[in-house]
């Protein structure tokens, strides 16, 4: 098992919690932090006792961009022929978006600065909740770089093309109340209530049958960008037939008729 140095982890009930733990650097992204997050989420993906995951940061930042020390190393690497960009490969770029999208439901509890890769990290999460202290920026243009992690599509899906264009081209900070109006986050809480609010939402999701949750995540990943409505409905129909044959559907019906809480098989 990997020994973690840049994250803190715990479980509460059926919820796994990851805290980025580099508060002196506002939890700036590093290759090591990325590897540790991947490792822990991967373990929870294989653990039937965990049904949802919360990501948050220690201190004043959620994740304030990439660590400049790592960034400087990348600049030198990228100057070389065939140099690998930070936004690709297993070191933390594109693969992170797909990994989160295919993982168990993930709630981003944005406690402070979410800048650059910190902002793009929350986009593939299933739910985003911010504290009143949160400030968000897709800041790449300020560094002469391109938005990464599929953010030019994911951000536009959440806030609309007009808002996404303005955010990407200015790189400005967006406060929590504006992020809520845009649809970038679904709720804003006082700082002291943020984590408990996120955990409560995660528990609500984790209380549903895991097989149905993961198939719905798959549909939401594939269907919104598919222009063929017949293909969308076919995909839904196939997953619905699978869900109807799963014991969790029968258990849900029985629990409803018997006026009791369901006991789903999430193994």
Image: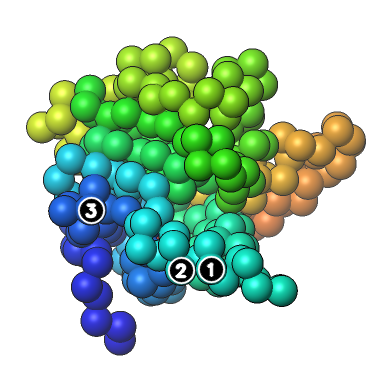
Q: Residues within 10 Å of mark 2 (few under 14, many from 20)?
A: few
Instruction: Give left or right: position of 210 versus 205.
Output: right
Quick one: SS at disc 3? helix
Gap in angstroms between the C-alphas marked 3 and 2:
17 Å
**Extreme-left residue of the structure:** 192
User: Based on the displayed image, in which of its 4 quarters is residue 36 positioned?
Assistant: bottom left
Residue 264: x percent and y percent? 40, 57
Q: Which residue is mark 2?
A: 73
Q: Earlier in the sequence, mark 3 or mark 2?
A: 3
Q: Position of residue 198 (x, y in %)?
A: 27, 39
Q: Earlier in the sequence, mark 1 or mark 3?
A: 3
Identify the disc placed on residue 76: 1
Using the numbered discs, state the Cα–Cα distance from disc 1 to disc 3 in whole angstroms. 22 Å
Q: Residues within 10 Å of mark 3 (few under 14, many from 20)?
A: some
Mark 3 lies on residue: 25
Q: Disc 1, disc 3: CB below 8 Å?
A: no
Dots 1 and 2: beta carbons under 8 Å?
yes
Using a 10 Å C-alpha cutoff, classify the residue at mark 1 as few (fewer than 14 neighbours), some (14 to 19) or many (20 or more). few
* Figure check: 235 above or below 17: above
Q: Is residue 141 above or below residue 172?
A: below
- Report the colour scheme: rainbow
Question: In the image shown, does 155 or 74 lie closer to the viewer?
Answer: 74
Q: Is residue 254 visible?
A: no
């Amino acid at each position: 098992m990997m020994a973690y140095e840049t994250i803190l982890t715990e479980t509460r009930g059926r919820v796994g919690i990851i805290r980025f733990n580099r508060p002196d650097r506002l939890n700036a992204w590093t290759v090591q932090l990325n590897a540790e997050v991947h490792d822990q989420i991967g373990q929870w993906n294989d653990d039937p006792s965990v049904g949802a995951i919360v990501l948050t940061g220690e201190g004043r930042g959620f994740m304030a961009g990439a660590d400049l020390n790592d960034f400087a190393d990348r600049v030198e690497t990228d100057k070389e022929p065939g140099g690998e960009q930070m936004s690709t490969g297993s070191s933390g770029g594109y693969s992170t978006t797909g990994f989160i999208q295919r993982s168990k439901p993930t709630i981003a509890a944005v406690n402070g600065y979410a800048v650059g890769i910190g902002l793009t990290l929350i986009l593939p999460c299933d739910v985003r909740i911010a504290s009143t202290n949160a400030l968000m920026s897709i800041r790449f243009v300020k560094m002469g770089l391109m938005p990464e992690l599929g953010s030019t599509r994911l951000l536009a899906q959440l806030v609309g093309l007009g808002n996404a264009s303005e955010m990407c081209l200015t790189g400005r900070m967006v406060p929590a109340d504006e992020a809520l109006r845009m649809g970038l986050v679904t709720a804003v809480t006082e700082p002291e209530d943020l984590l408990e609010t996120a955990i409560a939402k995660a528990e609500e999701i984790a209380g549903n049958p895991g097989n149905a949750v993961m198939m719905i995540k798959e549909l939401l990943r594939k269907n919104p960008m598919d222009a063929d409505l017949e293909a969308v409905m076919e995909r839904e129909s196939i997953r619905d037939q699978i869900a109807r044959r799963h014991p969790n559907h029968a258990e849900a019906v029985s629990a409803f008729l018997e006026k009791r809480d369901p006991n789903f098989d999430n193994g």
